[in-house]
């Protein structure tokens, strides 16, 4: 029994992943954002559960004669310019905003891991070419790229918006992957795997990436937050989702023009968006510190 | 160092051609016909359209147009837009606005961002430190247009401290509010970076040795800590100035500042190809110049990064 416990303890010490878990599980700043995010994910998955708490659950059931009316019975957050219930819309808007954040980060992460690993592991001129390719994407004006990409994709769906944002989010992540892969490339266990004659793909997926991906995943959490904000800005410029889609970005972009007359139409979606992003950034910070103890403060 | 510089310059030139060609292709791919919309309500006759297309070489293949453009660019000619106005002149009226906005925002970032970062880093784990950290995370979670309209309402409409929009009151009054809004995001990043860098340096072995030698706090912090923690901060500030000079579409739009960001956005919307390409080229030059400055800055400040 004691032997087992000891073995487990040693294992926990040697495996990077377990060490991170041991660090974060004691921190309040890990659990609070996680709880907030869990609630938001539930909202996004099942908006019908809570959307109808105060009245109708239909976000598109609008009463134009009640345009921009502040909080009233049945409409705790008031009604927006079209007379739709702000509460129900905020609840139903969670799905699109979270989905854009997740999809975009996933796509960007896949591209970043492919390109970053190639550049970092192979090195040499492959590295140079890929680094310059990354530069091209970083130097390209975002607006022009976004408009052209949106037009060639044709529609304005969660997926197409995610793709467009991912097109400009991957370079930063790719640079990070490259750096961490380079750091693990010459580690002794990688040398050992090479000496044993494992194929490169196996070395990469079993030895290099598991040890290099940690910091990148932590930063990716921050990216999800950044993307959710970016989606709302894109919508503000008229390049994001369009009605009849429902998203926080769309609500904020519509509300800002009449902010003075109807502040509640901006404040409530704003609070939800800020809470989401705040949780993601805090979580990302905690994870990053845990993965990289040297950077911990 | 020389070999590194030469290689870097060659790479920059390649990236320049890569991005400009990509931009050319992108403008080419913009939907709609810019010529037919020139006539407004009255459709242009086919002969006129054909004449204009010929004048702007729009019937040539993409690569031939691109090389013509690069050729003109090397002689300093940005060409004319679809209404015959000189692109260079249009840019010249817009750029001062963007530069004023960018530099004002940048100064705010340097002074307040570095100041807060130092304060937090030197007083690690106190309430000042926590406060700065919370502030930096809070601002990053509010979209810039929400921040901008709120600031407009509070400081422009309610308190009447600053003009609400436009540039009629000149620098600095007209630029104060937009520059502050624009600066807040970079400011948060600068503060966090400075804090982290100072904390790292303070806990390094050589600083411990300096304390042990009996140096005064003023000397240790004022000379050794500041110098050694400045590299990442200066790098970030250089990159950030480059990004700010590229124009701020949202801020310029909300505060009605006629800068390049706004011009780029309008030009893309009306398919004003020559103007888009002109602005985009300038943006890339700024981007590339920034990366050269960053490289130089790094090797100047930290001999270990010198390349050979």
Image (cartoon, rainbow, N blue to C red):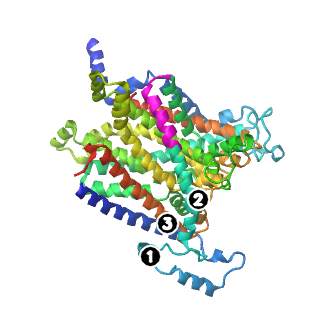
Q: Which residue appears farthest toward the top when viewing the image?
A: A2
Residue indicated by mark 3: B26
Residue A292, by quadrant, is top left
Q: Position of residue A70 (x, y in %)?
A: 78, 37
Residues packed near mark 2 inside 10 Å, few (<14), some (14 to 19) or many (20 plus): many
Marks 1 and 2 in Cβ contact (< 8 Å): no
How far apart are the alpha carbons under marks 3 and 1? 20 Å
Q: Which mark is residue B259?
A: 2
Q: Residue at x 43, y 23 (%)?
A: A25
Q: Chain of mark 1?
A: B
Q: Are marks 3 and 2 on the same chain?
A: yes
- At mark 2, the secondary structure is loop
User: What is the span of residues highlighted in magenta in the rendered image?
Assistant: B108-126
Residue indicated by mark 1: B72
Q: Position of residue B78 (x, y in %)?
A: 49, 72
Closer to viewer: mark 3 or mark 1: 1
Position of B64 relative to B303 (above/below): below
- At mark 3, the secondary structure is helix
The quarter of the picture where the N terminus of chain A appears is top left
| Main secondary structure along the magenta-highlighted residues | helix
Front residue of B188/A99: it is: B188
Q: Residue at x 21, y 41 (%)?
A: A186
């Amino acid at each position: 029994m004691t032997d087992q416990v000891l073995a487990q303890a040693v294992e926990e010490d040697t495996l990077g992943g377990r060490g991170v878990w041991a660090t974060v599980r004691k921190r309040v700043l890990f659990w609070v954002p996680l709880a907030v995010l869990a609630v938001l994910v539930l909202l996004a998955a099942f908006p019908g559960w809570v959307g109808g708490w105060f009245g109708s659950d239909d976000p598109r059931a609008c009463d134009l004669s009640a345009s921009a009316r502040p909080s009233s019975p049945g409409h705790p957050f008031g009604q927006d310019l079209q007379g739709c219930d702000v509460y129900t819309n905020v609840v139903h808007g969670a799905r699109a905003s979270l989905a854009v954040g997740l999809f975009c980060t996933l796509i960007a992460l896949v591209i970043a891991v492919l390109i970053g690993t190639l550049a970092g592991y192979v090195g040499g001129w492959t590295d140079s070419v890929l680094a310059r390719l990354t530069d091209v994407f970083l130097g390209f004006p975002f607006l022009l790229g976004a408009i052209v990409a949106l037009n060639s994709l044709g529609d304005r769906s969660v997926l197409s918006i995610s793709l467009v944002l991912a097109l400009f989010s991957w370079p930063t992540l790719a640079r990070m992957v490259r750096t961490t892969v380079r750091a693990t490339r010459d580690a002794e266990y990688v040398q050992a795997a090479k000496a044993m004659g494992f194929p490169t793909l196996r070395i990469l997926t079993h030895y290099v990436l598991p040890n290099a991906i940690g910091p990148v995943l932590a930063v990716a959490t921050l990216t999800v937050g950044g993307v959710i904000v970016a989606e709302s800005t894109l919508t503000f410029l008229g390049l994001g989702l369009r009605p009849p889609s429902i998203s926080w970005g769309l609500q904020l972009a519509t509300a800002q023009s009449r902010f003075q007359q109807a502040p509640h139409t901006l404040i409530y979606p704003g609070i939800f968006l800020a809470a989401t992003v705040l949780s993601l950034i805090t979580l990302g910070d905690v994870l990053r510190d845990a993965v990289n103890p040297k950077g911990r403060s | 160092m020389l070999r590194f510089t030469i290689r870097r310059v060659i790479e920059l030139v390649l990236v320049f051609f890569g991005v400009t060609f990509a931009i050319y292709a992108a403008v080419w791919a913009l939907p709609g016909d810019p010529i037919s919309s020139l006539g407004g309500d009255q459709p242009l006759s086919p002969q006129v359209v054909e004449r204009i297309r010929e004048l702007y070489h729009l019937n040539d293949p993409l690569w031939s147009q691109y090389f013509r453009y690069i050729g003109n660019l090397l002689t300093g000619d940005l060409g004319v837009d679809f209404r015959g106005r000189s692109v260079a002149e249009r840019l010249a009226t817009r750029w001062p606005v963007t530069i004023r906005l960018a530099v004002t925002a940048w100064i705010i970032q340097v002074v307040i961002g570095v100041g807060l970062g130092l304060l937090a880093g030197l007083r690690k784990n106190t309430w000042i430190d926590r406060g700065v950290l919370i502030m930096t995370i809070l601002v990053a979670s509010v979209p810039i247009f929400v921040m901008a309209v709120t600031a407009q309402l509070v400081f422009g409409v309610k308190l009447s401290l600053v003009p609400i929009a436009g540039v009629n009151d000149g620098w600095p009054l007209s630029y104060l509010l937009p520059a502050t809004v624009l600066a807040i995001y970079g400011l948060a990043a600068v503060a966090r970076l400075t804090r982290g860098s100072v904390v790292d340096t303070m806990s390094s072995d050589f600083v411990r040795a300096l304390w042990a030698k009996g140096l005064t706090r003023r000397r240790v912090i004022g000379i050794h800590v500041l110098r050694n923690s400045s590299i990442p901060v200066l790098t970030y500030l250089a990159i950030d100035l480059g990004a700010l000079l590229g124009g701020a579409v949202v801020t310029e739009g909300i505060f009605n500042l006629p800068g390049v960001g706004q011009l780029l956005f309008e030009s893309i919307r009306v398919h004003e190809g020559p103007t888009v390409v002109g602005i985009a080229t300038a943006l890339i030059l700024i981007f590339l110049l920034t990366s050269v400055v960053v490289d130089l800055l790094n090797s100047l400040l930290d001999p270990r990064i010198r390349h050979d």
